C-alpha cells in the first residue's frame, strides 16, 4: 500500500471500460447527458456505434437498458449516483432487478464528495440499491480497484450498482492488489477496534488507524468494496477479535455499510459497541468544496479517531491528526 | 386469417376472458372488451410468431393476452381456469414468469422503454423483427411514456409500433374526467410519430393500420385505437366499471349467454 498523500489518476474508469469494450462486443455504453463527467467520452470517441445517448431521461434509459439486456447485451448505464438510483428507482426495480438482468448501473459523485447540494449528493443510493433483490452493490476505494471493477462485474449474472468518485482518483493499493467481489479485505490487523470502510473512507480509516496506533490503540481496517452481498464471514471474524466496531461510509448511516455490518454482528450475537460514521440522517448543505462537507458532517479522519476513542472509553482528548501537505495531483483524506 | 375468422377470434377472446373473470366474480373485463379486436388482428394476423416481439405494458391486460394465446394454441387452455388464483401460473397482473410475453410491466408507463430496448437490440444485430408495444391511454399520464416517445422518434425506430388502447378508462373513472390527454393523436404527432387514429373495434381498420405502420420506414408508428370498455356486451349496466368490474353470478351468466349467442351468430 502507498502512504498519503497518495498519487492520483484521471479517468481510470473510462479507460478500463473502453479497454473491456474493445474485447467484448456485447458491452454497450449508455449516458444520461453526463458523458465527460462519467469518463465515457473515451468510449464515445472510439466506439460510437455502441454508445447511446439516453439524454435527461433516466426512467426511460433504465427501461431501454433492461430491454437491451434481455437480448444479450451488457449495458453500462452512466449518470450521477442520485439520478442513477433515487430518480428511476421503480424502473430499476421492475425493468432490471426483478428480471435479474445484467445491467451495470454506474453512479458517479458519491455522497458529499460534491458541493452540488442535496440535489446532487447521492447519500442514499447504496441503501436504495441494497434493498432491491438480485442487486449487487459496490463502492471501491482507489484507482487500482476502479480499473479492476469493470472486468470483475461484466459477467456477474444479475444487475450491479457501482458508485464512483469523480475527478482525481487516489492510488492507495499496489499494482498487485486484487479486487475480489466475494471478499472484504483486512488491510491492518488490530485487537481494539474493528473499522469497516468502503469507497472514499478506507483512506481516512487508514490515517486514523496510524494515529491511533501511535497512541496505543490497535485497529483492524477492513476495506469493504462489496456492500451487497456482504462478506459476513470476514465481518464477523474481525468484529469478534475487537472490543468495539466502527463503520465509515460516505453515505447516510441508514441502510448502507453501517446497517449491513450492524445486522451481521447482531445476527451473529456478537454484542460489540458500534459507532456508525457517515451522514447522521441529514441532507448536507453549504459548501464550496467536498472536503469542507467531510469535516462538517463528521466524515474526517479526526471524526474517526474521536469515535474510536470515545467508544473505547479512553480518557481525555482524542489524539490530533498531523497536518499533511498535499501537492497538486496528490490526494490526502480529510 | 380471414376477416370472418378474425371476427370469430375477437369474440372468442372476449368470451374466454369473461369466463376467466366470471370464476372470480371480478376482474379486468373492460380491457378485454376494449382490446379484443386489437389482440385478434395482432396475434391472428399481423404478428410473425417466433420472429416479431410483443410487449404488454399494462400488465393487467394479461387476461386478454391469455385468451388470445389460448385460442391460437400458444398457451394450454387448461391454465385459463386457474387465472388469478393462489399459486396459478396466470396471474391477474402478468409477471416475469408469465409464458410467451417478450416483456410485460405491472408498474404502468414502463413498457414503451423496454420495447425500445428490444427494438434497438434488433437494429444492432440487423435482425428483421417488428416490435409491437401495447399501451393503454391512461399510461399517457406517466412522464416516462413521453421520455420514451421522444427517444424512439429521435432514433427513427420505424420497426416499433404502438397499439394504444384509447378506451378512456382508468381506476378513478373516465380518463377525460381525471386528466385531459387529448389531443392524443396530435401529441404523438408532435413527438415525431407516424399516427393512425382509428376505430379500435373495426378489424379492417386495425389491420390496415398495422400494415401502414409496417410500410413506414422513417418513424415509429402509433395506432390510436378508439374503443369502449363495454363494447359488444349489452347486458352490462350503464355505470359498469371499465377498469375493474364486479360480476355477480346472475350478471356473469347473462353475459356468458350473450357473448356465446353472438359468437354462434357468426356461424349462422
Image (cartoon, grey):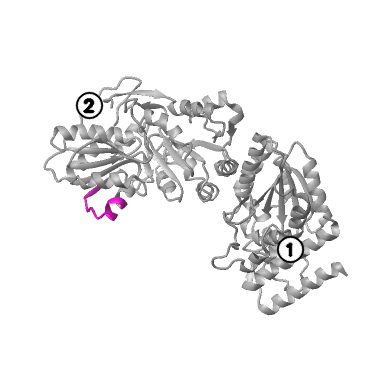
**Chain under callout 1:** B
Which circle marks residue B13 in the picture?
1
- Tell me: B24 left or right of A109: right
Discs 1, 2 touching: Cβ within 8 Å: no
Which residue sits at x=18%, y=44%?
A: A310
Q: Which residues fall within the magenta stretch?
A: A263-274
Neighbours of disc 1 within 10 Å: few (<14), some (14-19), many (20+): many
Badge 2 is on which residue?
A323
The quadrant of the picture occupied by the N terminus of chain A is: top left
Disc 1, SS: helix
Residue B100 placement (x, y as % from top left): 64, 54
**Chain under callout 2:** A
Q: Are marks 1 and 2 on the same chain?
A: no
Residue B167 placement (x, y as % from top left): 72, 59
Neighbours of disc 2 within 10 Å: few (<14), some (14-19), many (20+): few
The verdict on residue A48 being magenta is no
Residue that lies at the very extreme toward the bottom in this rendered image: B250
Residue that lies at the very extreme toward the right in this rendered image: B268
| Marks 1/2: CA–CA distance | 77 Å
The verdict on residue A265 being magenta is yes
Amino acid at each position: 500500500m502507498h502512504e498519503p498523500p497518495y498519487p492520483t489518476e484521471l479517468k481510470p474508469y473510462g479507460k478500463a471500460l473502453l479497454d473491456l469494450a474493445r474485447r467484448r462486443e456485447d458491452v454497450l455504453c449508455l449516458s444520461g447527458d453526463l458523458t465527460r463527467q462519467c469518463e465515457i467520452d473515451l468510449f464515445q470517441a472510439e466506439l460510437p456505434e455502441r454508445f447511446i445517448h439516453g439524454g435527461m431521461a433516466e426512467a426511460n434509459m433504465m427501461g431501454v437498458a433492461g430491454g437491451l439486456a434481455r437480448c444479450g447485451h451488457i449495458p453500462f448505464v452512466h449518470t450521477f449516483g442520485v439520478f442513477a438510483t433515487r430518480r428511476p428507482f421503480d424502473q430499476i426495480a421492475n425493468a432490471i432487478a426483478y428480471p435479474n438482468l445484467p445491467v451495470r448501473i454506474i453512479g458517479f459523485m458519491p455522497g458529499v464528495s460534491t458541493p452540488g447540494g442535496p440535489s446532487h449528493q447521492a447519500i442514499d443510493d447504496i441503501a436504495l440499491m441494497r434493498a432491491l433483490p438480485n442487486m449487487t452493490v459496490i463502492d471501491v476505494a482507489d484507482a487500482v480497484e476502479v480499473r479492476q471493477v469493470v472486468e470483475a462485474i461484466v459477467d456477474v449474472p444479475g444487475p450491479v450498482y457501482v458508485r464512483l468518485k469523480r475527478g482525481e482518483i487516489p492510488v492507495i493499493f499496489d499494482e498487485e492488489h486484487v479486487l475480489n467481489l466475494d471478499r472484504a479485505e483486512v488491510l491492518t490487523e488490530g485487537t481494539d477496534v474493528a473499522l469497516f470502510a468502503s469507497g472514499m473512507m478506507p483512506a481516512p480509516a487508514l490515517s486514523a488507524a496510524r494515529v491511533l496506533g501511535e497512541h496505543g490503540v490497535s485497529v483492524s481496517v477492513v476495506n469493504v468494496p462489496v456492500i451487497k452481498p456482504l462478506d459476513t464471514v470476514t465481518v464477523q471474524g474481525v468484529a469478534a477479535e475487537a472490543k468495539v466496531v466502527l463503520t465509515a461510509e460516505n453515505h447516510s448511516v441508514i441502510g448502507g455499510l453501517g446497517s449491513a455490518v450492524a445486522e451481521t454482528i447482531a445476527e451473529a450475537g456478537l454484542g460489540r459497541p458500534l459507532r456508525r460514521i457517515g451522514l447522521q440522517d441529514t441532507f448536507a448543505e453549504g459548501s464550496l468544496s467536498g472536503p469542507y462537507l467531510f469535516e462538517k458532517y463528521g466524515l474526517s479522519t479526526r471524526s474517526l479517531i474521536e469515535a474510536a476513542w470515545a467508544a473505547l472509553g479512553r480518557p481525555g482528548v482524542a489524539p490530533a491528526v498531523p497536518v499533511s501537505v498535499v501537492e497538486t495531483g496528490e490526494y490526502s483524506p480529510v | 386469417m380471414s376477416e370472418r375468422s378474425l371476427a370469430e377470434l375477437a369474440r372468442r377472446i372476449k368470451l374466454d376472458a369473461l369466463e376467466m373473470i366470471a370464476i372470480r366474480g371480478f376482474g379486468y373485463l373492460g380491457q378485454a372488451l376494449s382490446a379484443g379486436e386489437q389482440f385478434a388482428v395482432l396475434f391472428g394476423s399481423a404478428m410473425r410468431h417466433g420472429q416479431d416481439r410483443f410487449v404488454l405494458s399494462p400488465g393487467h391486460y394479461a387476461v386478454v393476452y391469455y385468451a388470445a394465446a389460448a385460442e391460437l394454441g400458444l398457451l394450454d387452455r387448461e391454465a385459463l381456469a386457474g387465472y388469478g388464483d393462489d399459486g396459478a401460473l396466470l396471474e391477474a397482473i402478468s409477471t416475469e414468469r408469465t409464458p410467451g410475453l417478450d416483456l410485460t410491466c405491472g408498474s404502468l408507463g414502463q413498457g414503451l422503454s423496454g420495447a425500445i430496448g428490444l427494438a434497438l437490440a434488433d437494429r444492432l444485430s440487423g435482425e428483421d423483427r417488428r416490435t409491437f408495444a401495447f399501451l393503454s391511454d391512461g399510461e399517457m399520464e406517466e412522464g416516462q411514456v413521453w421520455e420514451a416517445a421522444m427517444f424512439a422518434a429521435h432514433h427513427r425506430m420505424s420497426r416499433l409500433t404502438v397499439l394504444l388502447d384509447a378506451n378512456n378508462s382508468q381506476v378513478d373513472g373516465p380518463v377525460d374526467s381525471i386528466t385531459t390527454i387529448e389531443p392524443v393523436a396530435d401529441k404523438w404527432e408532435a413527438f415525431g410519430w407516424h399516427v393512425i387514429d382509428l376505430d379500435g373495434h373495426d378489424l379492417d381498420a386495425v389491420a390496415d393500420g398495422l400494415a401502414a405502420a409496417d410500410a413506414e420506414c422513417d418513424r415509429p408508428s402509433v395506432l390510436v385505437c378508439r374503443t369502449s370498455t363495454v363494447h359488444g356486451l349489452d347486458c352490462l349496466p350503464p355505470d359498469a366499471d371499465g377498469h375493474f368490474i364486479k360480476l355477480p353470478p346472475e350478471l356473469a351468466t347473462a353475459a356468458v349467454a350473450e357473448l356465446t349467442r353472438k359468437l354462434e351468430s357468426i356461424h349462422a
